[in-house]
Image (spheres, coloured by chain):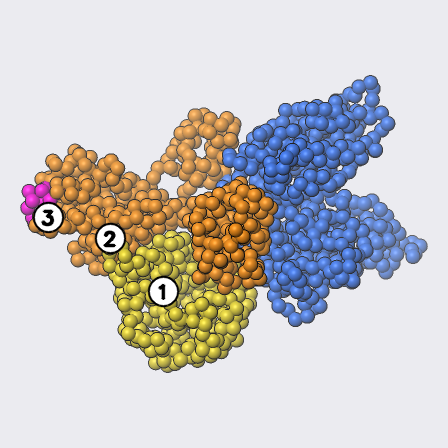
Chain colours: A orange, B blue, C yellow
Amino acid sequence: MALTALEIYKLLPKTNCKECGFPTCLAFAMQIAAGKAGIEQCPPASDEARETLGAAAAPPLPKVTVGSGERAVILGDEVVLYRHEKTFYHPTAFAISISDALDDDAFGERIRRIRALSFERMGETLAVDMVAVRCDSGNAARFARAAAAAKEGAGLPLLLSGPCEALAAALPSLGSDRPLLSPPSGEEEAGARLAAPLGLPLVVRAKGIDGLERALNAARAAGARDLVADPMPASLPEALAMSVYLRRLAILARVREVACPTAFDLGNGFPFPFAAASLLVPKYGSLLVLDLDDPADLFPLLTLRQNIFTDPQKPIQVEAGIYPVGNATPSSPVLITTNFSLTYFTVRSDIEASRVPARLLVADCDGMSVLTAWAAGKFSGESIARILSESGIAGAVSHRTLILPGMVARLSGKIEELSGWRVLVGPQESSALPTYLRRLPPAAFAPPDV
Amino acid sequence: MSDPGTGTIRFLPQGVSVPVATGETILSHAIRAGVPLLSPCGGEKRCGKCRVIVAGEAAGGNDPGILSGADLRAGVRLACRCRPSGGEDITVTVPPESLPAKLIAYLEGRDLAEDEPFLPLHTATGGRNPLGVALDLGTSTLAGALIDLVGGRLLARTAADNPQMSCGEDLISRIVYGEESEGGFALLRQLLLSGVEKVIAALLRSAPADGEIVDVTAAGNTVITHILYGVSPAPIRHPPYQPVFREYPVRTGEEIGSLAASSAPWRLFPSLGGFVGGDIVADVLASGMHREETVSLLFDVGTNGEVALGNNEFLMACSSSAGPAFEGGEVACGMRAYPGAIESVRIDPDTLAAEWTVIGGGKPLGICGSGILDLCAEMFRAGLIDRAGQFVPRTGAPFAETARGRAYLVASAQQSATGSAICFAAPDIKSVLRTKAALCAAADSLLAAVGLPRNAVERVYIAGGFGNFLDLRSALSLGVFPPFPMERYVPLGNASLAGAIGAIRSRRRWKEALALAAAATYHDLSSDAGFMEAFQRALFIPHTDEESYRTVLSPGGGR
Amino acid sequence: MTVTLPKQTFPGRIVEVTLPAGEGGQSVSVGGQTTLPLMPEGEQPNAASIGIEVRTGDEELPPSLARALSGKGTDPSAIARSLVRECGAQFLFLSLAGCHPDLGGHTISRGAGIVRDVLQAVPCPAIVGGCGEEETDALLFPAVAEAAPRPVFLSYADEKNYRLVAGAALAYGHGVVSWSPIDINMAKQANLLLRDIGMPPHRVLIDPLTGGLGYGLEYTYSIIERIRLAGLSGDAALARPILCHLGDSWKAREAMDSTEASWGDVVDRGRRWEEATAWACLAAGADLLVCRHPDNVRTLRGIAGTPWR
């Protein structure tokens, strides 16, 4: 029931007083509609406005925090079913399991393997978020030791999975770290009584939506607040359906009783864990527990997560840099364009169509097209000259000739003056590149005379 | 040859009457009467563009294939096939869309909101006649009007090219010129002032002997207004992309740099943002949309392609940077609407050859905006281009392979006044599509920004000289505007000048302009994520969402 | 309180498209659904279909593919037969990359001959891909259209070349794959142009361009979701089955690089790189997947091969 900007505007004072920081009430209303501002920024707002707009802003899916400090993990707090409607905010958390039944060496090895699940990509570190300690031994004291060792060894927030007796034993040494407690199905009330006094988050496990509703209510009645729902699916199709239903219930139907982040245990013999994880990352799984520890499995899963949780409202752009097209040699032509994805893709494909190997310099213009970037001052004689000297293109080619998009022909003089490169003005339309490139004389790309 | 006992045929709005000659068509009466009426096919009864509204006895010209039921009931007939029955007086009204474009297009404008009698408030020194000058400072054209401030009468109107064109066809180029050339802004200001002074001098030729200019209003876009005001508009082009002034404190003509109106106060219409200026404020003022409960859209179809949306509760405006294709720019054979310009086009569905009318008659030099619009709509209708604007290979079609690739031959070398063929090539079609897509997408983006559906818009005002003379059917076939039913469109002509005239005539109107500008919201399309998508959607003929256009273009014409 | 399961229904239906098979083969039908993928709701007459790419031309293969395809020789027909038998691929994507001047420079007649031979050797449905070089493909598509012994789908037609490809398809009874570069409006525009030229809806598939994992997959993912939602909500020109060619995922450094030990074994990693891309596409709404790794065909068929109830 999102209100349009105009509907919100009608609730505002319409005086354009600018106390909210926006030039007009309508501009402010548009920001509220986009979720980028709140009614509290408007001191003269009426009570009716505050009530209507405040309520509409309450998140449909509550936030649950696990762990604390820098490595805290946030679950839930989502507002849309489809990332293209806005964005997904909190990446699916990955918890790698470790069993308390392992001997010291095996335990240490497992911790080491978990720590190694960290990869660098595109300037970001992709890593697993938590360690899930399983009580396989049946021994509360052993479980407590394992939990403490896991905290010490991995330095990650913990999910503690075991009977309440074992959980209670582990808490004293971990309590202030805010672990996520995960008792077996049927023990939610006992689990709640453990979690509530310390304000700890709790996984409530039950089969099916109705079962979950009852269990969640019971946990709440026993005082627990930060709840995560595990619908205990037996198969991959069931897991996916449950995940989707729970998200729809929270966001579309606004059924508060079952509006929780979700957790799925894809270890312990769950069928096809890699496939399940691949599906649950885009389809609303808040937390996945995996027995997998092979980087060959986790690297693709973490990359998938990185992709899905990118903000789609940023214009699609490619990384700036030098892109060789075909088998480019030091005497191949050099062209330049902006980093708006569509521009880059079109120009690149037209160069490929020409069958002339070349290098395409992509300038960082905040994802704008050539004309837009030029009008906004982001694609100028100065910025292009800077790219020619700083990108390393001079080391990749033996000539000093640049082909400029015809639309910004007027920049050629400035570029030549500032960089010393020679500028050829290319066609206005990228589609004319094949003809243009094929007709270029090779002499245009001879090394400059010494 | 008139027979005794026959009536007269009176043409409106021209107010010209001629006796009825039995057996002659209305079109031929119009030609004899010197009443301009569009007829690209030359009266051969093929193009359907000579629509007139007939009150009185007349037969013929009621083709159901071209005219809708609503049209026929309203008395619309095709002048080339309609003949007065004779013996009675009839009145024939020529609607705006059947008028050929002329330079006069840049001057005539409707002020719909002017509703009060003129109050003479001005006095001049020494008993001289007080005069007011209203100016429209356009990117390509400067227009002016002279008003007698005793009786409120319009004394004269004139227009001239903006001399700044030599420093750049579009506003960004002019800012860049100003920033990068030594003394660039001083030169731009000097050029502008010389153009303005020329306009004022031309106006004064129609002034009473004792006239003195005591009041000046000027409406122009933000860049040009800044330059006139003596301030560099460069900040518009750099973060945070804000103009230096929104409201311009009044200065005398002397401070501005004008000799002809040096003692008069110069009131410059306020700007809304970097690329939406006082000209749009004046457009809105003239349309009256800011006083209506119903929601309206306003298009200023020029190089900057500004669009405004609102009613008496809110107003939002943006600039689509549409490009000059509808002013004849960016298109190789394009030209302004001067004599020699092809202003309307029709393509024969069988021969695939073009037929056209030229402003002022004679051989064509090029094509102006309304002609370009017609040409593209006709090429699509004839199956010569596909929905993406790409040429379709058709046997017998007059295509030529030129240095710019394949082109459609509008006029051969022998037919053209220049001795070179007039061709429309693929890059020209692309320019037109980009221009029209920007306009259409700007409107859809404003609607999306406030959260209104298209059907909430009751009226669509078209400002800008081109607007009076574009063929609405061609415009909708091409998809220049979103698919509003045709009867919702209201052409305003040069509303910017009309608004400036209104502000000279009435202090209250001037205050109204200031108030509506202060309350308006400027919408920056470059940061509107939906605009690029709306633009891509609109880059199709008529649009990617074609279903909605089919209803408004069907003979029923929408409601 | 019993909570009602929030099933979603839509007014539209995705057109059902059948890829015909040769004698003894099994045709493939996709589309026909009234609902979102992989959910037990609405009507879903067909599960997603998983195919394998058979690629001509000279190229260095990523280690994972090199291992999987080793020992199969160089004859496209033999490779095709072996792969289909081994992994149960439901259709072939025959890529005539070898006709590209830089990847083998095969002649047009050789390309057309390969199509004829492979289709005669293997009866399963086929999609034939051009070489990606404009001038060569302008000659290749008509030749392939004529040489194919049974109806295939030609990949691909876009805004620029649709007259040529659809023309060939219409002349010889084939279907087309309608391609656009990760843009929902261009996808619709391409389909409208195909409609204008007379291509019937049940002979059109949408290829939205599948960016590989880590290199644009999320753009593809959202465009597929949007296309599917539009088609189900009544936008007729977008109510077509969607084809995802997973080839781009193999261009990733992460799928090919064998030097980084911390990244795990490249043979497994490469295959998983394609598999993760595949699952994401299925979650968004893909109806056909073209894999390069036979193990992935097996895995995907095993799990997603029948409609989920």
* As drawn, B106 above or below C155: above
Proximity of marks 3 and 1: CB atoms separated by less than 8 Å: no
In-image side of C225 versus A416 (left or right): left
For the question of whether residue B388 can be seen, the reply is: no
Q: Which of the pair A359/C62 is nearer the observer?
A: A359
Are marks 2 and 3 in one subunit?
A: no
Q: Which residue is mark 3?
A: A100
Q: According to the image, label 2 marks what residue?
A: C262
Which sits in the foreground, A420 or B316? A420
First-in-chain label (1 vs 2): 2
| Element on which disc 3 rests | loop
Bounds of the magenta segment = A135-147
Q: Taken as a whole, is the magenta stretch helix, strand or loop?
A: helix
**Residue at mark 3: chain:** A
Question: Closest to the observer: C295 or C222?
Answer: C295
Using residue B124 as the reference point, say whether residue C285 is left or right of it: left
Labels 1 and 2 in the same subunit: yes
- Residue B548 sits above or below residue B124 on the image: below
Amino acid carrying label 3: it is Asp
**Residue A139 among magenta residues:** yes
Using the image, name the chain to which the residue with label 2 belongs. Answer: C
Can the viewer see residue B423? yes
- Residue at the spot 48% in from the left edge and 66% down from the top edge: C133
Q: Secondary structure at mark 1?
A: strand
- Name the residue type under label 2: Ser
